[in-house]
Image (tube, rainbow, N blue to C red):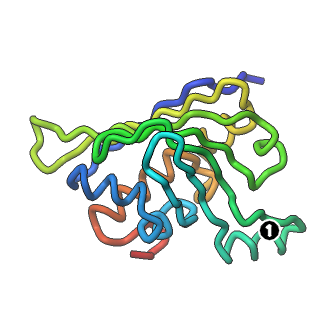
Amino acid sequence: MTEPLTTQVFRVWIRSTPEKIWTAITDPEWTAKYGYAAPAHFDLRPGGSVRYDATEEMRSFAKENGFEVPDVVVDGEVVEADPPRLLKQTWRMLMDPTTAAEPFTTLTYLIEELKSQPGVCRLTLTHELTGAPATSTMVAGSPLDEAGGGGWAWVLSDLKSLLETGTAMNGQG
């Protein structure tokens, strides 16, 4: 079995502004529209809290599959915030007992407006996962899973779809 990567880097190019991308990452009304649809709440100052709340869909899925979901599914704290360019935070998945027992990992979003392509930004997400093999496997996603198990690549693709078309891959918008 291959060891999970301790640093994973994902990139997506989005036809949008840095401000809109920043808002889509940090505003709970936006985060509830794409990816796993968990509203994210940020206190955007060093040491400020980060939390992603469980949704009713998550609770229903868990109940149907014989487990419970905590009210907060991801927690962490802001390390650095430089809107609309850089967000660095700690991150820990609480939905699964295995990932909840692992240490906090570090997630960095870098938003860069391309000089060569006006109106296009490169969003780079770097996830440092030292000491968190279960989290590493989870966020890497599975190329065989059509939805939900796609990890960060799937979340970023959904964010791109929402910002460029007004509709997420799940049809929400």
Residue drawn at 27 percent across, 62 percent down: 164
87 lies left or right of 129: left
Residue drawn at 62 percent across, 58 percent down: 148
Above or below: residue 17 compared with residue 165 = above
Residue 106: where, in percent of width, then height?
Answer: 56, 33
Tag 1's secondary structure?
helix
Q: Is residue 108 visible?
A: no
Above or below: residue 21 compared with residue 67 = above
Residue 22: where, in percent of width, then height?
Answer: 33, 53
Residue drawn at 19 percent across, 41 percent down: 113
Residue 33: where, in percent of width, then height?
Answer: 46, 69
Residue 72: where, in percent of width, then height?
Answer: 69, 61
Query: Total number of numbered labels?
Result: 1
Q: Which residue is mark 1?
A: 62
163 lies left or right of 109: left
Q: Quadrant of the C terminus?
A: bottom left
Q: Quadrant of residue 139?
A: top right
Q: Quadrant of the N terminus?
A: top right
79 lies left or right of 38: left
Going by the numbered disc 1, the residue's amino acid type is Ala
Above or below: residue 75 compared with residue 62 = above
Residue drawn at 75 percent across, 71 percent down: 61
Q: Quadrant of residue 58?
A: bottom right
Residue at the far right in the pictured view: 66
Q: Residues within 10 Å of mark 1 (few under 14, many from 20)?
A: some
